[in-house]
Image: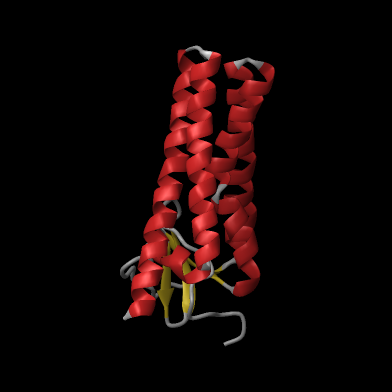
Amino acid sequence: MAGLTDKPLVAGRNIYIHNKKTIYYDRLTDQNYIIRNENVRAYNYLSIRHFLAFAFGYTGAILTSNFWIGLVIGLGIWGVMSYVFYKRYLPKLAVDEGFKRPKTVPYTDSLAQRLSYGRLLSAFLVSLMLAFVVVFNAIVNQYDTVVLVLNFVLAAGAAALAFACLIAFFKKRKAENQ
């Protein structure tokens, strides 16, 4: 079975492992797509389209000091990446018709499998520092309400990632001690 793996190289709510195949279930198309090793890199890039759109939109809003320009940038990036995902990437993948969705692979379990202790701690610290810096920056610069809310949303996301890395660290430690 060349190109298939029994360990997930991708993670997320809609990723499943079935018969040594990594399956992506897409709720929009209601299809089960097989992600082979050669498709993993593109999937990982396109699966973070929401985050990238937010990050570039947020950065655009900060750099131009205009919320609406940032919103247009973010929506534009999200639209282009979603188009590429649904119209170019997914049609190239094989569809698994007989797959029934089992239990998902939790994100923290996937992080624990893929990353070393050092990388988990580094990701935890960097994400936590990002959350604090974003909040500190928003308070010091006294942004208007919309940008302030966006800053707090970004900080909450960074804190959630830090928390997930910390949970993965302890899961990895517990699994190795058993």
The residue under the point 44% across, 31% down is 153
The x, y position of residue 48, in whole percent, is 55, 49
Residue 16 lies left or right of residue 86; in this view the side is left
Coloring applied to the structure: secondary structure
**Residue 115 versus residue 13 in the image, above or below:** below
View extreme (bottom): residue: 1
Residue 63 lies left or right of residue 9; in this view the side is right
Q: Is residue 164 visible?
A: yes
The x, y position of residue 108, in whole percent, is 40, 61
The x, y position of residue 8, in whole percent, is 49, 72
Quadrant occupied by the C terminus = bottom left
**Residue 160 versus residue 143 in the image, above or below:** below
**Toward which corner of the image does residue 60 lie, by quadrant?**
top right
* Viewer-proximal residue among 68 and 85: 68
The x, y position of residue 47, in whole percent, is 54, 52
**Residue 115 versus residue 156 in the image, above or below:** below
Q: Is residue 32 visible?
A: no
* Viewer-proximal residue among 61 and 104: 61
**Toward which corner of the image does residue 52 lie, by quadrant?**
top right
Please count the marks in the image.
0
The residue under the point 35% across, 65% down is 104
The residue under the point 55% across, 15% down is 141
The residue under the point 57% across, 87% down is 1
